[in-house]
Image (cartoon, helix red, strand yellow):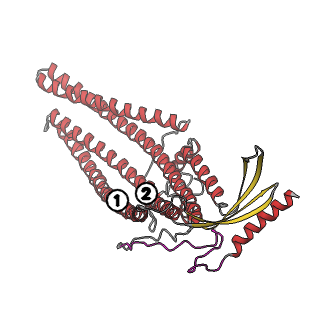
Amino acid sequence: MIPSKALSLLCATTVLAGCMTGGLGGGLNFAPPHLAGEAPAPTQAHSSPEATDFDAAGEGEVVETLVARRSVLPEDGIYDRVADAALTAGSRAAEAELRSAKLRAEAENKNWLPTLSSTVSLTSLGETLASLVVDQVLYDNGKRKAERAYAAADVEVAAVTLSQDQNDRVYTALSLYLTTLRGQDKAAMGGKAISQMQGFKRIVDGRVAGGVSDKGDQRMVEGKLLDLRASRDLDAEQANTARAELQAMLGLDIPASDVAPLKSYAPDGLDPLSVIKAEAEAKRTVAQATAERAGQLPGLSASGTLNRNGTSGALNAGTSQGLGFGTKARLDAIENSKETARENVVEARETARRNRSRLEQRLVSLQRQERETAKLVRESRKTFSLFQSQFKAGQRSVLEVVNIYEQLTRREMERLDAKYEVILVQLELARDLGVLADGGAI
């Protein structure tokens, strides 16, 4: 009969918690924690128009927002290939943390149900007495509801962290790929310049041998040739280093391909991941503060005990920490932590706006530089062609032609730098918004 008594005791305790939905002693709500509202708590009004009601924020909104984000990388393009390889080869430590957070949230989702425990005590007669104890919280000032909200917010924080981690990984892979291409392009441009400069050196060597030019001209051309070789070797080393790092990161070799700036890189209406994470952390902090506040206040629970002597039940009222002269200060400190969380969100929004404005202005500047350097390259080519013709006609010295060609080479390098910097800034803007990969794929 003991099992049937235990079952009856458990059902009675649970039904008692479910039936006590009315008020008691001034309107206290004794519904189960998953139905009962949180106890009213004094809150400080926030003066910012961007303030969010983190107490009433819906669960799962952050995850839905992240899943809905779509990659801005052209489908089936070289950027998309690098991004897919980066996601496939990722270690996924943040994914493991997200799974752990989801399991914790699943466990906390049932925290309103009764708990069973057993005790073994020694009586005054020297006998042992085993008991089965059933506990059911009837009123806890919203503590268990806050614990569930904390676990849900913890899932959201882990989800944003995963999105940031994967977008950072894609950005790193793409930046390494672009660094490889830039180094290869500049090294190829340097090799072409070296070949041309060697032709000039042969002309100068012949003129020096014929007594037309002095050795100063020869040394000047040799110095420019050495500079070009050093620059080419440096660019080639940077390309090889980035390529080796990318291959180690992805586990495969991505062939070189022509790249172009992104047509879309910062969709409107999307909050940066840093802001979303700050909001999720604020929700978690508010939930934690609510649970801590509830732990400072008296609560009500029902308990039942079953042993060989029979069954017994009791209503228990009290607080786990007790009330004292420092209780009010502790409650005020807990409430202040909520305000701190809200201020952190405002600060995160401001930082995100400043960072985006800085990147957008830098992008505008780089695009202008790219256009200007492209124009200067065209003009320098025309000037170089003209000087070559004048040199052949005896109207220009070889050093004048060498200086013009050196200027042309420098502007070609600047154009390549501006081209790749434009793409990198676009990728950085897309990374901050979390659109370097599909949210569903992450």
Which element is circle 1 on? helix
Q: Mark 1 touching mark 2, by CB under 8 A?
A: yes
State whether residue 152 is above or below residue 382: below
Q: Nearer the viewer, residue 89 or 202?
A: 89
Residue that mark 1 sits on = 351
User: Splitting the image into 4 quarters, where does residue 207 fall?
Assistant: top left
- Asked if residue 349 shows in the view, the reply is yes
From the top left corner, tell me how far across and down residue 141 is, in percent. 55, 68
Residue occupying the far top of the picture:
209
The numbered mark, 1 or 2, whose residue comes first in the sequence reads: 2
Query: Is residue 27 shown in magenta?
Result: yes
Where is residue 348, by image quadrant? bottom left
User: Measuring 34% from the left and 29% from the top, which residue is drawn there?
Assistant: 233
Main SS class of the magenta portion in the image: loop
Residue 150 vertical placement versus 166 (above, below): below
State the residue lying farthest toward the front: 125
Disc on res. 248: none
Question: What is the x, y in percent for residue 88?
Answer: 59, 44
Q: Which residues are magenta?
A: 21-46
Q: Amino acid at mark 1?
A: Thr
Q: Left or right of 35: which side holds 409?
A: left
In the rendered structure, find residue 274 and report the number of the disc placed on it.
Answer: 2
**Viewer-proximal residue among 205 and 148:** 148
Residue 121 in picture, x, y percent from top left: 72, 47
Label 1 crowding class (10 Å Cα cut-off): few <14, some 14-19, many 20+?
A: some
Q: Is residue 171 magenta?
A: no
Q: Is residue 289 left or right of residue 224?
A: right
